[in-house]
Image (cartoon, rainbow, N blue to C red):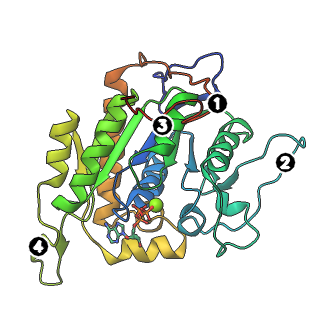
Amino acid sequence: MSEVTVSRTISAEDPIPEVKNVVLVMSGKGGVGKSTVATNLTMALSRLGHRVGLLDADIYGPSIPTMFGVSGRPVSMDGKSIEPLERFGVKLMSIGFLLEDSKAAVIWRGPMLHGALQQFLKDVHWGPLDYLIMDLPPGTGDVALTLSQRLGITGAVMVTTPQAVATDDVYKSVSMCEKVNIPILGVVENMSWFIDTAGVKHELFGKGGGQAIADFAKAPLLGQLAIDPSVREWGDKGTPIVKAASDNVVSSSFIQIAEKLLEVIDARGGDHAAPVIDRSGGPGGKKRLPVTKS
Ligand SMILES: Nc1ncnc2c1ncn2[C@@H]1O[C@H](COP(=O)(O)OP(=O)(O)OP(=O)(O)O)[C@@H](O)[C@H]1O
Ligand SMILES: [Mg+2]
């Protein structure tokens, strides 16, 4: 096992002080592969010898139960904290584990959503971890904002696909991270190309989006991932491809992305900005819309 010495800034109020690094996997855009990247990055870091957990921060559309093939219910040993589920040697928590009916919609307003997220941090017994990966929902960043106000975050991995309609939204995510002091650790370009049975490469969604986002974020392009139907098939079957088919080219890409991410985290050191704790009663709390009085 490799030694993880770098740690995020952990304040006295931190809900998970035993977790050395928190990495958000996010994107302004839906369906670009955030959950696929989060699950496979989790497995890749675990394969590289680290203690890893994965928190499904997508309350309305949790994917982790399906992608890890887990349907059990977390239990509590002491009646207070919840034990995360464990699969393939990594710790998992998702709202999907707590729902009576996985097909039923979660009808919660913002404050409940943020309350659930906080419980996932405070009340889940994550124990000592080198990396806690968080799979974020699509959007500019309500969830990222809440998280940034609750704990020190090592940084974010931005996921994009190559085309402009995706990158337009991802720029906004990068900008939002900058505003709330979340460092961008790197960019992953997913669905970069498809190689057909004759070996011909097709750039179905154009090219250059990942590099453009990386330039904008002043962060490295951690890697590009091919479109491969087996990525989806394994995701649906509940075993991330890095675990299911380690010789697949996409699995190798994920391992390289994980190695590069570790280099970036190491190079940055542990000296990150602490969270800006918001005591105004939660996001939006007592704040007013910036309307100028006439
Ligand atoms: N490189 C790839 N090759 C083939 N299929 C892929 C690839 N990446 C993702 N997929 C598939 O695309 C679909 C969307 O991926 P995923 O759920 O990871 O996206 P997401 O960004 O998390 O979506 P959401 O915004 O809904 O949370 C899934 O069915 C997944 O298996
Ligand atoms: Mg997702």
| Residue that protrudes farthest toward the front in the picture | 294
Identified by mark 3, the residue type is Leu
Mark 1 sits near ligand 1, with its Cβ under 8 Å away: no
Residue 15 in the figure: left or right of residue 145:
right
Measured along the vertical axis of the image, is residue 63 above or below residue 254? below
- Pick whichever of labels 4 and 2 is earlier in the sequence: 2
Q: Which residue is mark 4?
A: 201
Is mark 4 in CB contact (under 8 Å) with mark 1?
no
- Pick whichever of labels 1 and 3 is earlier in the sequence: 3
Q: CA distance from mark 1 to mark 3?
A: 14 Å
Task: Specify few, some or many for label 2: CA neighbours under 10 Å numbering under 14, 14-19, or 20 or more.
Answer: some
Q: CA distance from mark 3 to mark 4?
A: 39 Å
- Pick whichever of labels 1 and 2 is earlier in the sequence: 2
Measured along the vertical axis of the image, is residue 183 above or below residue 92? above
Q: Which residue is mark 3?
A: 145
Q: Which residue is mark 2?
A: 76
Q: CA distance from mark 4 to mark 1?
A: 52 Å
Specify whether residue 25 is in view: yes
Mark nearer the viewer, 4 or 1: 1
| Helix, strand or loop status at disc 4 | strand
Specify whether residue 183 is in view: no
Task: Specify few, some or many for label 1: CA neighbours under 10 Å numbering under 14, 14-19, or 20 or more.
Answer: few
Identified by mark 1, the residue type is Gly
Mark 3 sits near ligand 1, with its Cβ under 8 Å away: no
Which is more toward the observer, 236 or 102? Answer: 102
| Residue that protrudes farthest toward the right in the picture | 79
Q: Which residue is mark 1?
A: 281
- Pick whichever of labels 3 and 4 is earlier in the sequence: 3
Is mark 1 in CB contact (under 8 Å) with mark 3?
no
